[in-house]
Image (tube, rainbow, N blue to C red):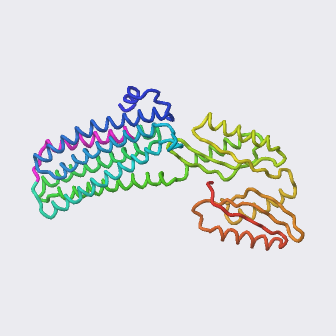
Amino acid sequence: MGRLLIKLFVKDADDVDSPRVRAAYGTLAGAVGIVLNILLAVGKIVVGTLFGALSVTADGFNNLTDCGSNVVSVIGFKVAEKPADKEHPYGHQRMEYIAAMIVAFIVLVVAVELAIESVGKLITPEESEFSIATIVVLAVSVLVKLWMFFFNRLLAKKISSPALKATATDSISDSAATLAVIVALIISHFTSVDLDGVMGLVVAILIAVAGIGIFRSTLSRLLGEAPDREVVQGIKDRVMSYQGVVGLHDLNVHSYGKKLYASVHVEVDSRLSITEGHELADEIERDFAANTEIVMLVHIDPVAVDDPIADRYREMTLGVVRAIDPEFNIHDFRVVNGAARVNLIFDVAIPFGGKLTEDDVEKRIKDAFAAIDPKLNPMPTVERQLN
C-alpha cells in the first residue's frame, strides 16, 4: 500500500536527492497522517466521552496533536525545498530538523497534560463503562498506527529524513499506548480494579519517552553529529583513487540536510608544480560536485616521496605513535636537520572519545624518542580527527 501511494503521488520518486521530490514525500506523509489521525481522534473522543473512559479520550486528543505534528512536517518539507539565498547560502534543508524538534515538543506537551489528568483520576477515581464499541475503535487504532509506522519508516528510509523518522517513532509509541489502554479496559471490566488512570499514566510515560528520543536524536543532528562511517570511507576511497594522491588527512564533513560540505588535505609529491597540484585539486572538486551530493574543498599538502632518510624517520615515528594506540596516525611529516639534533615535525591524528588527552599523547611520544635517541627531537601537533 505504501509503495502504491508513492507511485501515485510522488513524481520521479527515485530522485531522492531532489528538494522537490523530498518535499513531495513529506507532503504525502503529512496528508496521509492528517486524514488518518482525524478519523482516529473523532472515533476515540466520541467513544471515550460516551463511556467515561479518560484514557480513551486522552488517546483521541493525542491523535489530534499528531495532526498538528503532520502539519508541521509538511511545512518543514516545503521550507526545506527552498533553494539557497543571500540569508541562507547553504540552503534550507535543516528546516526538516526544526520540524522534527517541534514534533518532539508537541509530543512532550501531550505527555505532560495526559499525566496530569491521569494522576487526577487516580486521586478521585471515576467508574468507566466498558463497551465492545470502545474495544473495536481502539483495536482499529492500533492497526492503523502500526501501518502508519511502517509507512513513515519506509518514506524516512527512502529519503533519509529525520522528520519522517520522528513521525514513525511517534506512530509506534501511539500504537503501544493504545494497546495499553485496551488491556486496562479489559482488566477493569473483569476485575474490581479500575486501571483507567494507571494506564493513562503509562500512556503518558510512553509518549514522553518517544518525545525525548525524537528530541535527542534531532538535537544531535542540529549540533553537528559525526557523519556515517560509510560516508567518510566513501570520500576517502574516492579521493585516494586519483593518480598523484599519496595520502589524505584533516577530513571534515558538515551536514546541511541531505547536502554535505567537506574539506580535506590531500598529500602529493612535493616535486609536483603548483600548477599541477592546483589542477589535481580542481579535478577532485569537480568530480564530487558532478557525481555526489558533497561540496568538496581540497587543500594540497606537498610531502617528500622516495626520500630514504625521511621515509626511515617517518616509519620510526609511525611505529612510536601506533605503539601508544593502533588507532593513531601521522601526517604532514617533515625532517629538519639542526646542528645538534634532528627535528621531526609532524601532526598526530587521534580519534574522538579516546581516554588520553592531547598533552598525554605528546608526552608519551617525546619520552619514547628520548629512549630511542636523544638527538631526535619530535615536535608533534596532536589533534582529534575523524577516523
Quarter holding residue 114: bottom left
Q: Quadrant of the C terminus?
A: bottom right
Q: Main secondary structure of the magenta part?
A: helix
**In the rendering, at what x and y percent does residue 42 appear?**
19, 40
Q: Residue at x 62, y 33 (%)?
A: 290
Quarter holding residue 22: top left
Q: Quadrant of the N terminus?
A: top left
Q: Residue at x 85, y 66 (%)?
A: 342
Quarter holding residue 330: bottom right
Q: Residue at x 85, y 50 (%)?
A: 306
**In the rendering, at what x and y percent does residue 123 appear?**
15, 64
Q: Is residue 129 magenta?
A: yes
Which of 300 and 149 lies nearest the eye of the viewer?
300
**In the rendering, at what x and y percent does residue 294 appear?**
59, 41
Locate residue 207 relative to residue 49 in the image: left or right.
Answer: right
Q: Is residue 10 magenta?
A: no
Locate residue 177 relative to residue 124 in the image: left or right.
Answer: right
Which of 53 and 62 lies nearest the eye of the viewer?
62
Which residues are the magenta region? 128-152
**In the rendering, at what x and y percent does residue 358 appear?**
65, 67
